[in-house]
Image (cartoon, rainbow, N blue to C red):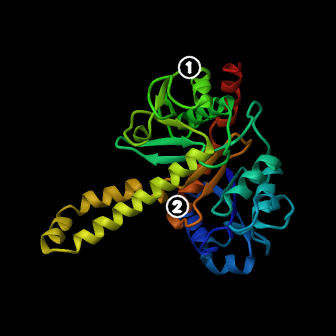
Amino acid sequence: MTTVAIDAMGGDYGAKPIVDGLVMAMKQDKNFKAILIGNKTDLDFYIPKKFKDQIDLLHCDDVISMTDQATDALKRKESSAYLAIDLVKTGKADAYVSAGHSGASMSLATLRIGRIKGVSRPAIATIMPTVTGTSLVLDVGANVDCDANNLKEFAIMGQVYASEVLSIDQPLIGLLSNGEEPSKGNETTKEAFKLCEKIPNFIGNVEGNDIFNGSCDVVVCDGFVGNILLKTAEGVADTITTIIKQNLRRSLVSITGAVLMRKVFKKLKLKVDYAEYGGAPLLGVKAPVIIAHGKSNSKAIKNAIFQAIKASGSDLNNTIENRLNTYKD
């Protein structure tokens, strides 16, 4: 049975959505255990009576806030993030979930849990909606500066995750660039193109629109580009939603049309809602680490927990190590 260590204090809205998400997950699937790390008094207040015996609590008062430096995380050994990661390191938990400081989670996971053999740098991956399903984009913030070999490793890790956890059959890999031709891109992406050509199902360079049109399953880029891409996509989704709402209120015809198209709008909302996908896995470390959005609601936490459980039950790490060794230069 998988045990998930959950940093219950790091999110923007405190412990309530974290606890609510865990309870939602337990209502849906009772075949996992959870350890919540945070202020026991606060956590106990939000846990329903019938779930109190199913959830272990580990008390701490220190929380790494979003304004703190990620490098401070290693010094703050009594923080919720440090204690949760330490449970995974010592084998008391199998996976880690947090909606807190992503940099702190990444640093702690990399240095305390450790990297998979052959991985030079872990990468944060995120799931993006497409017209046909979803695509996996990495890196979206862990590594601002990358070399060609880093990008090749991201491609391999992303392909394995898409196959093992997202259940995509033979995932197609694309290298994000400013044109489809092999000659396009900067020196790093041009070199990465040559390295990635050895990987099965590498389709070459892809452009920004290919992330959403379903033409590939895994999109590879450095963390600088990926983070801007992620924030831009979130902004576009919010803007479109706001524009639609504003225009729907302007006339009776618009309101009537909206009523008739409510099923379409519902499906659209589900498609672009980050809560549907849970969180972003940190690929390349020895145990599943899922970094949820700071503004995560209970549904997002529930799905992040299920993502961690599925990754824990897969052969993800062994497969990544074997693939990296297969395509080693």
Occupied quadrant, residue 323: top right
- CA neighbours of label 1 inside 10 A, class few (<14), some (14 to 19), many (20+): few
Q: With 254 as the anchor, is 179 left or right in this view?
A: right
For the residue labelled by badge 1, is the local secondary structure a helix, a strand or a loop?
loop
Q: With 149 as the anchor, is 296 left or right in this view?
A: left
Q: Which three-letter amino acid code belongs to the residue tagged 1?
A: Glu
Q: Is residue 160 above or below residue 130?
A: above
Q: Nearer the viewer, residue 262 or 240?
A: 240
Residue labelled with disc 2: 300
Mark-to-mark CA distance, 2 and 1: 36 Å
Task: Name the residue: 63% across, 33% down.
Answer: 151
Residue labelled with disc 1: 197
Q: Is residue 203 above or below residue 80?
A: above
Occupied quadrant, residue 114: top right
Task: Name the residue: 61% across, 40% down.
Answer: 222
Q: Which three-letter amino acid code belongs to the residue tagged 2?
A: Ala
Residue 299, visible in the rendered structure:
yes
